Image (cartoon, rainbow, N blue to C red):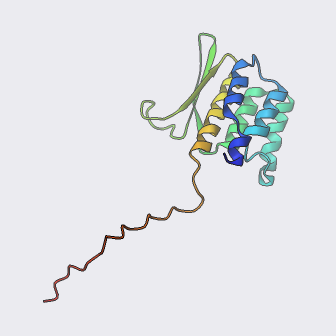
Amino acid sequence: MTAALRRLDPPSLNQRLRAAPTTTRPLMLDIIDHACRRFPSLGQSERTARVMRLVDVEAWADAALALMELELPMWQVRRIAYDEGEWHCALSRARELPEWLDAAVEARHADLALALLSAFIEVQALAMEVSRPSVPTVRPALDPLYEPIACDNFG
């Protein structure tokens, strides 16, 4: 198991989010500490300060959206809906596609911020599973019995 996967523990974070009745400062700071890779970087100081200001004033939904903007630049909110006492949130990489073609990540909770954060954690876990190498892969070695031949007719 890589260090990044040990740091992000999606099942326990998701369970904590599902069990929480509302968003709290310790829960939000725990999510930032365990699920955010870009947050501590020095180049993002203005954006991280914005997230922390929103956490300080307990603007949980705005803080969750700002955190998504910082951590998931390729993902966008596709849908936020309230139905039968629960908020439904869907995040997508291709929001312009018809909904039936899109592979959106969806989450739901009675609290809007927790629904947003649950979807955020799901995307972070998905990104960890599909981590790509920073260098291109090498083509596999050719079969030792394979021998290229020239088929030109010089006659």
> Which quadrant of the figure has residue 68?
top right
Please state if 26 lies on the left or on the right of 101 as rendered: right
Give the x, y percent position of residue 144.
36, 70
Residue pushed farthest top? 84
Q: What residue is at 45 percent from the left and 30 percent from the top?
A: 99
Give the x, y percent position of residue 6.
71, 42
Residue pushed farthest bottom? 155
Can you say whether 44 is above or below 90 in the image? below
Q: Quadrant of the C terminus?
A: bottom left
> Which quadrant of the figure has residue 130?
top right
Can you say whether 65 is above or below 86 in the image? below
Give the x, y percent position of residue 125.
63, 38
Residue pushed farthest left? 155
Residue pushed farthest front? 145
Give the x, y percent position of residue 87.
63, 19
Q: Quadrant of the N terminus?
A: top right
- Residue nearest the viewer, comparing 136 with 44: 136
Q: What residue is at 84 percent from the left and 28 percent from the top?
A: 26
- Residue nearest the viewer, comparing 16 with 92: 16
- Residue nearest the viewer, comparing 10 with 66: 10
Can you say whether 20 is above or below 11 in the image? above
